[in-house]
Amino acid sequence: MPDQNPAIEQNPTIKRALISVTDKTGIVAFARSLHEEFGVEIVSTGGTAKALVAEGIPVRAIDDLTGFPEMMDGRVKTLHPRVHGGLLARRDVSEHLEQAAQHGIGLIDLVVVNLYAFEATVAKPQVTYEEAIENIDIGGPSMLRSAAKNHAAVTVVVNPAYYDQILAEMRAQQGATTLATRKRLALEVFETTSAYDNAIYSWLYGAISDEAPSPFMPNKRLFLAKAQDLRYGENPHQQAALYKISGGGNAATLCNAEQLQGKELSYNNYLDLDAAWAAVREFSEPTVVIVKHLTPCGVASGADIAQAYERAFACDPVSAFGGVMAFNCQVTTAVIEAIYANGQFIEALIAPGYEAGAQELLADKPNVRVLVSGGINALGEGFDYRSIEGGLLCMSSDSTLDDEFALEVASQRQPLEGELAELVFAWKVAKSVKSNAIVITRDKTTLGIGAGQPNRVNSARLAVLQAGGAAVGAVAASDAFMPFADSLEVLAEAGVTAVIQPGGSVRDQEVLEAADKAGMLVVFTGTRHFRH
């Protein structure tokens, strides 16, 4: 065990700083304060040094510190014992300090580094392999890791947001920082470098494959940034928080939506909003989806968004009370007026935008949670993740067909005018309903929804029960094939005249014979849409 030096300062005064940043936000003001208020010697590299010198801040070039020039197009400039020895030497170990003095290594007390913008580089549409490689930072992560390892004595800053806090602490601590602060900053360094390495790994995995790489890489690392703590989880005795997936793709996601007003969103609010937002994005016409307990209870399209809302609400006013709503276009003042006229209590709304008048009316209900997405993501992009005990399931996101002419007419009866478009609407709704799903619609409005039953015939019975007499002349969708004719027979008896389903059952012929006997239209999609 090396000799300890009990005389060392508990919080060493910052006398020398090494600054090398890609993001130069606030760096001039920070460096000026370090120099003018505390007399800190500033060592810097390349572009950062030029930026500081241009503002009249004295800078010692890195090659003067190391005795070696920056070389190989800047690939080698800080990988030197006089840098890493100055960062890693323990101030409380006499042998370390003696060796540093013997080899002319001066101590470095503060490191301010952020990394080459690798993720932004590889996100460019036309980025070349060579350009990406050159934007892999080597010296930056190395300095950060050395400084963070020795946080007992070295302050390391990777985020410009901490500059003011560091200066305030130095003013209060006679030019030093506290150990508690250095620990927190070191933790952020290792969080940053681990995410940075993962970004490089993920890009390189795809870039070096001779063939199209599998989206399911051998080692998949999800970096989750906590967005907020939630009051509780699914039930009050459970703790919960919301995390955002780093590099989660398009900005117009639920996690990135801006909350314009209302109480804090709950765990269950987020789940319901996610179900509603995923469902409403299926439609190109103005459409409203009302969700209660993860299940759509009213879905409708209309000539405008106000008409779509009125139709969606009329589907099931009882269930709509206390639900959440999603809109696929701007919410107009007329929509909010209609909500108030219906006396509908709503937990939350999400939409791409809101008219000024709509926002003014919503402000009269300050507890209503109002979210704006700023846009709508394309369908079928990205991945869905679900947890199981001890693991995570990952799959590519689901989306439905948007082409009625891709359907196969399987029954003897041929479609009437407008029937296929109605079936496609019902099919899109069924995708967002818990399996086993049966959905009855007319005029692009849901009439009855049977969801989440262990067998399909009971889902059909529930949908028919809810639709009542309105089922006569309506169409229905089944999210998976009908394994027996019984589900179709329940729908036919209620007056449903057309059914859309994937097909593919060993008893398809039996189902089609029942349809032909009842004079029903049956179309196959060839694709199922389970939602467990």
Image (spheres, helix red, strand yellow):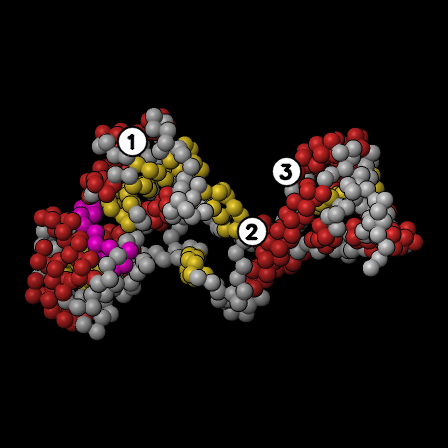
Residue under the image location 30 percent in, 36 percent down: 346
Residue under the image location 35 percent in, 33 percent down: 368
Q: 15 left or right of 251?
A: right
Which SS type dominates the magenta stretch?
A: strand
Label 2, secondary structure: give it. Answer: loop
| Residue 361 visible in the displayed image | yes
| Residue 440 is a magenta residue | yes
Q: CA distance from mark 1 to mark 3?
A: 40 Å
Residue under the image location 10 percent in, 67 percent down: 514
Residue 510 coordinates in the image, percent (x, y): 14, 71
Relative to 108, does residue 194 appear above or below in the rendering? below
Q: Mark 3 sits on what residue?
A: 161
Q: CA distance from mark 1 to mark 2?
A: 41 Å
Q: Which mark is residue 336?
A: 1
Q: What amino acid type should be assigned to the residue bearing mark 1?
A: Ile
Tag 2 and tag 3, C-beta contact below 8 Å: no
Q: What amino acid type should be assigned to the residue bearing mark 3?
A: Ala
Q: Quadrant of the C terminus?
A: bottom left
Residue 314 coordinates in the image, percent (x, y): 19, 40
Of 444 and 274, which appears nearest the observer?
A: 274
| Residue 162 is a magenta residue | no
Q: 252 left or right of 179?
A: left
Q: How many marks?
A: 3
Residue 496 coordinates in the image, percent (x, y): 12, 55
| Residue 65 visible in the displayed image | no
Q: Residues within 10 Å of mark 3 (few under 14, many from 20)?
A: few
The range drawn in magenta is 434-451
Q: Residues within 10 Å of mark 1 (few under 14, many from 20)?
A: some
Q: Mark 2 sits on what residue?
A: 124
